[in-house]
């Protein structure tokens, strides 16, 4: 595996899928704990994950099966897509393909907490802090994508090869990482919780 660092402020190498997955599980546990403690929405880890690690992350009354996307680093170049970096978040192309094919009724919670507000090694302006929980159904996300409002950003360092043609069609490179992500704005989806600072510290 190539040890590729993009933003030195991010503590996990971008290509280390295993570490990102483990961190994602920690975020799921904290999200469930804090949503149940500080909001009117009751959330639990989806019981199906006990036998299928690829099952949707959460089970939420009134929302059904949902995934959680914890967003910690702004998309610093989002302005080229017409979105202010403070409001921009990303959704992997491979996830969009999977949702479209397997979970057309799923909902997604986006937990924004800009912890890495500077891009070390690049001359990008620091992004103002933002914290919030936002929600959208995959149908709403697909509508935004299919109309062309959300643009696809391709990761140049994740190249295809003919060896894994099926994987490439699913939006993944040879290592199983996303080849690209759609860039969206929190202004396009539903705010659930928001705060000037982190209320879950």
Image (cartoon, grey):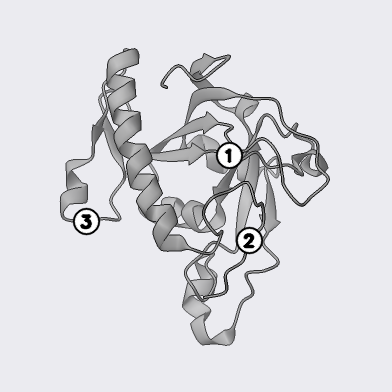
Residue for point 27% across, 20% down: 36
**Quarter of the rendering occupied by the C terminus:** top left
Any part of residue 60 in sight:
yes
Give the structural element (helix, strand or loop) at label 1: helix
Point 66% across, 44% down: residue:
183
Q: Nearer the viewer, mark 3 or mark 1?
A: 3
Please say if 167 is above or below 19.
Answer: below
Task: State the CA–CA distance, disc 3 to disc 1.
Answer: 28 Å
Q: List x then y, in percent, for residue 64.
A: 29, 32
Query: Residue beneath label 1, please?
Result: 143
| Whole-number angstrom distance, CA of label 2 to CA of label 1 | 33 Å
Return the mark for residue 5. Answer: 2
Q: Are marks 3 and 1 in contact (CB under 8 Å)?
A: no
Label whose residue precedes the other's in the sequence (2 or 1):
2
Upstream in the sequence, badge 3 or badge 1? 3
Pick the residue in front: 80 or 113: 113
Q: Is residue 138 visible?
A: no
Mark 2 or 1: the one toward you: 2
**How many marks do you count on the picture?**
3
Residue identified by numbered label 3: 52
Q: Residues within 10 Å of mark 1 (few under 14, many from 20)?
A: few
Q: Quadrant of residue 39?
A: top left
Q: Secondary structure at mark 3?
A: loop
Tell me if 169 is positioned left or right of 29 in this view.
right
Labels 2 and 3: the sequence-earlier one: 2
Query: Mark 2 falls on what kind of element?
Result: loop
Task: Between label 2 and label 3, give the one nearer the viewer.
Answer: 2
| Vertical comparison of 56 with 157: above or below | above
Residue 177: percent from left, percent from top: 51, 65
Q: Residue pushed farthest bottom?
A: 163
Residue 104 is drawn in which quadrant?
top left
Q: Percent x, y for residue 148?
A: 70, 45
């Amino acid at each position: 595996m190539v040890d590729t660092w993009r933003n030195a402020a991010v503590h996990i190498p971008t290509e280390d899928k295993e570490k990102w997955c483990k961190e994602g599980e920690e975020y799921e546990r904290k999200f469930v704990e804090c949503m149940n403690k500080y909001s009117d929405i009751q959330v639990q880890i989806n019981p199906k994950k006990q036998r299928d690690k690829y099952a949707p992350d959460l089970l939420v009354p009134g929302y059904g099966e949902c995934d959680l996307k914890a967003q910690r680093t702004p998309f610093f170049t989002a302005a080229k897509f017409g979105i202010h970096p403070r409001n921009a978040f990303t959704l992997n192309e491979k996830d969009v393909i999977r949702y479209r094919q397997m979970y057309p009724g799923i909902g997604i919670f986006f937990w924004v907490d800009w912890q890495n507000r500077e891009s070390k090694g690049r001359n990008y302006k620091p992004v103002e802090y933002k914290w919030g929980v936002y929600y959208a159904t995959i149908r709403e996300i697909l509508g935004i994508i299919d109309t062309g409002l959300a643009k696809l950003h391709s990761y140049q360092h994740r190249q295809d090869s003919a060896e894994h043609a099926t994987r490439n069609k699913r939006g993944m490179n040879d290592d199983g990482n996303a080849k690209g992500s759609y860039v969206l704005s929190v202004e396009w989806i539903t705010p659930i919780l928001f705060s000037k600072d982190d209320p879950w510290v």
